[in-house]
Image (cartoon, rainbow, N blue to C red):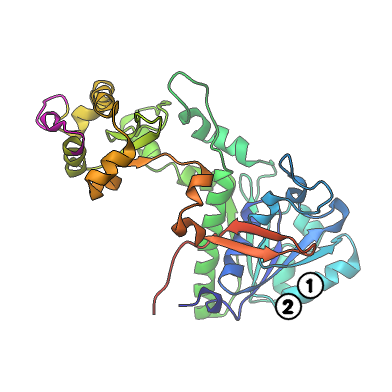
Amino acid sequence: MDNQKIFSDLKVLELSSVLAGPAVGMFFSELGAKVIKVENIKTKGDVTRSWKMAGENPESNESAYYHSVNWNKEVHFLDLTSEKDRKQVHRWVAESDIVIANFKYGSAEKLEMDYETLSQINPGIIYGSISAYGKNDPRPGFDVSMQAETGWVYMNGDQDGPPTKMPVALIDILAAHQLKEGLLVALMKRNKDSKGCEVHVSLYNSSISSLANQASNWLNLHMLPKRIGSQHPNIAPYGDILKMSDGMDVMLTAGTQKQFEELCTILKKDHLIDEALYATNIQRVINRKSLVSLLQDAVRNLTFEELHKETANIGSVMVPIQNLQQVFQSSKAKEMILSQKEADGMESLRVATVAFEIYD
């Protein structure tokens, strides 16, 4: 199925900036919706336009960061404190299906861009809003503060190293996914009752909801997650890193008993399968340090390429750790790249936010 046909009759008005809201807007644009993005002319647009890496063109009004979530949108620079510009936005609201907003606390009401106001203009409008801590909580918040406050930074990093944040704005991305899901549910609801509604997502709740097994380990067992690098607290050898003879780092991904046995066979360490210290997953977790040491000895004089030639199954138990240059040499990764010609004639690139495929 052609993704661009899925929402070809949908109109989305994006009154948001930075990452979470614009990522939702780009999601709908990838699926064929017309997305109108309104940026604050008084601040020279979305703040991420100025978030440039060293080496980016200082004269350009766009950055690589901005490009990451602003593909295929119709952009307008307006001043929402101006009655003329507000009326223009209200005209767009009248013919739109979805509004995406992440105004500061109280600002939407002052600017007449809140759900109550816009639903009077268009009773069928679905209003997706994002806050830091909740709809009625005035506190501001940012991705890095959420990572710190909701446990991610404390858990992340090496055992002997400092707490570490994730290398992407993970909570913003998680909140974007929550809002996408909420808006899709709201569209289904509107198909039944023809009524609009507000869908609200907070960064805080999005972060807490994504703690998954780490939260359950604490809630059920009072096991406080500790920094263990890339290792998995419940599975071994999974997330453990070995260094090959050519200097390549590889990650072990033996998540099942069968895969552990395959790994032992590949590395010619079959005797470990029946060794009492490593026979079960729980024993491997307890004795992880000695197990990883034995596995490291097994690959000390081998290259990943040599192992890969010996078995086609190696990818199920061991994979190379790649940088982004290596990642985007893959044809599968290249299929995820979206390009766009900008106003200055330059081509911009980013990865798609839509990773699913639908087949008729």
Quadrant where the C terminus is found in the figure: bottom left
Quadrant of the image occupied by residue 245: top left
Magenta stretch?
Answer: 266-277
Magenta-span inclusion, residue 168: no
Q: Please, what is the dominant secondary structure of the magenta stretch? A: loop
Characterize the local packing of mark 2: few (<14), some (14-19) or many (20 or more) Cα atoms within 10 angstroms.
some
Q: Is residue 1 left or right of residue 243?
A: right
Q: Secondary structure at mark 1?
A: helix
The Cα–Cα distance between marks 2 and 1, rounded to whole angstroms, is: 6 Å
Quadrant of the image occupied by residue 55: top right
Q: Secondary structure at mark 2?
A: helix
Quadrant where the N terminus is found in the figure: bottom left
Which disc is residue 90 wearing? 1
Q: Is residue 21 left or right of residue 158?
A: right
Residue drawn at point x = 53 percent, y = 29 percent: 164
Characterize the local packing of mark 1: few (<14), some (14-19) or many (20 or more) Cα atoms within 10 angstroms.
some
Whether the residues at callouts 2 and 1 have beta carbons within 8 Å, the answer is yes
**Mark 2 — residue?**
94
Q: Position of residue 352 (x, y in %)?
A: 55, 60
Magenta-span inclusion, residue 275: yes
Residue drawn at point x = 17 percent, y = 28 percent: 278
Q: Position of residue 297 (x, y in %)?
A: 26, 23
Q: Give amino acid for label 2.
A: Ala
Residue drawn at point x = 52 percent, y = 36 percent: 150
Relative vertical location of residue 118 with respect to residue 9 in this rendering, above or below: above
Q: Position of residue 228 (x, y in %)?
A: 40, 27
Residue furthest out toward the top: 160
Which disc is residue 218 wearing? none
Q: Nearer the viewer, residue 329 or 66?
A: 329
Q: Position of residue 147 (x, y in %)?
A: 56, 37
Relative vertical location of residue 312 with respect to residue 94 in this rendering, above or below: above
Res 219 seen here? no
